[in-house]
Amino acid sequence: MAYKINQKKCIKCGACVGACPVGAISYDANGNVVIDPKKCISCGTCYAVCPVGAPEVQ
Ligand code: SF4
Ligand code: SF4
């Protein structure tokens, strides 16, 4: 189980970037907010703080 941000839903508000306890979320070179699957511990915090439900379990 891993979380991935649905780019069609994400409004790039940045709330999840600061909320992730392991620093797995960042902006990529294109300005999209992405999750590093190697760091993600699937805690669900990004989903909890996201206003649009963009982080999805893949
Ligand atoms: S599920 Fe948790 S560890 Fe994974 S990206 Fe979201 S906040 Fe970070
Ligand atoms: S909290 Fe949701 S809308 Fe905001 S940057 Fe993260 S995934 Fe995108």
Image: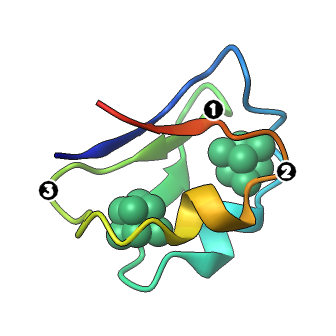
Q: Which residue is mark 2?
A: 51
Mark 2 and ligand 2: say if the CB distance to the nearest ligand atom is below 8 Å: yes
Residue 15's image quarter? bottom right
| Left or right of 42, for residue 7 | right
Q: Position of residue 21 (x, y in %)?
A: 44, 85
**Pointer 2 or 1: first along the chain:** 1
Q: Position of residue 2 (x, y in %)?
A: 24, 46
Q: Quote the CA–CA distance across marks 3 and 1.
A: 18 Å
In this rendering, is residue 51 above or below 39?
A: above
- Label ID, residue 32: 1
Three-letter code, disc 2: Pro
Judge depth for marks 2 and 3 and give the one in front: 2
Can residue 24 be seen in the rendering of this structure?
no
The secondary structure type at the circle numbered 2 is loop
Judge depth for marks 2 and 1 and give the one in front: 2
Residue 16's image quarter? bottom right
Q: Residues within 10 Å of mark 2 (few under 14, many from 20)?
A: some
**Pointer 2 or 3: first along the chain:** 3
Q: Which residue is mark 3?
A: 38
Three-letter code, disc 3: Lys
Three-letter code, disc 1: Asn
| Left or right of 1, for residue 16 | right
Q: Residue at x 23, y 70 (%)?
A: 41
In this rendering, is residue 45 above or below 52?
A: below
Q: Residue at x 73, y 31 (%)?
A: 10
